[in-house]
Image (spheres, rainbow, N blue to C red):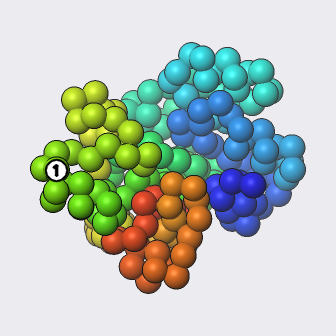
Amino acid sequence: MRLDLRLAERWIKPQSRVLDLGCGDGELLAHLRDKFDTKGYGLEIDEEKINDCVARGVNVIQQNLNKGLSNFGDNSFDSVIMTQALQAVEKPDQLLNDMLRVGKQAIITFPNFAHWKTRSYLFFKGQMPVSEALPYSWYDTPNIHLCTFRDFEALCHKLDIKILNRLAVDDDQQGSFLMKYLPNLMGEVAIYRVSR
């Protein structure tokens, strides 16, 4: 089972309310609904992925995350999830605040730009890296705010956001001893659970 599904099972309580930002094909929401009777919505901009959500029976709203979450009231959800989308939004700081306004906790994942392979690619090739975690060329990437574990934690400190859990994993969502103790250097993907 995918790590994000396993973590969701650990961090999201049965029958809770969940909002999934950039929900893709709705796999995570469908899994939580079927296994834990959660109630939720997904936000997605891609029409093909919206159709996949509808086919799975997932409640989905077509919405650009750059517009914020003003259409949701305070504390509308128990958990707000955003996987691999933080780096693609225009104002990640504002969206993080919004996520914790509408939800009691947030689960966020993003590619770590300080990973040793990224550093090596820049050092040896002198070009922006292309990898599984960062699969786009510099000129066509949706990633406009690349960050590292340290960058994200500094932003959380600035916004008075509490970090409840932090995991560093590779592209296959596997962790290791080195990733645990040297996340900024060894982790390809960052996974955080945060709250106020």
What kind of element bears circle 1?
Answer: helix
- Whether 125 is drawn above or below 192: the answer is above
**Residue at x 53%, y 36% (from the top left corner):** 22
Q: Nearer the viewer, residue 164 or 187?
A: 187
- Considering every residue shown, the one lying at the far left of the view is 126
- Whether 38 is drawn above or below 187: the answer is above
Q: Position of residue 72 (x, y in %)?
A: 55, 37
Dividing the image into 4 quarters, which one contains the N terminus?
Answer: bottom right
- Whether 182 is drawn above or below 68: the answer is below
**Which amino acid lies under the numbered mark 1 shown in the image of this protein?**
Lys
Taking the image as shown, residue 191 lies to the left or right of residue 157, namely right
Q: Nearer the viewer, residue 32 or 103?
A: 32
**Residue at x 27%, y 34% (from the top left corner):** 137
Q: Is residue 183 visible?
A: yes
Number of other residues with Cα within 10 Å of mark 1, as a class: few under 14, some 14 to 19, many 20 or more: few
Q: Position of residue 132 (x, y in %)?
A: 44, 46
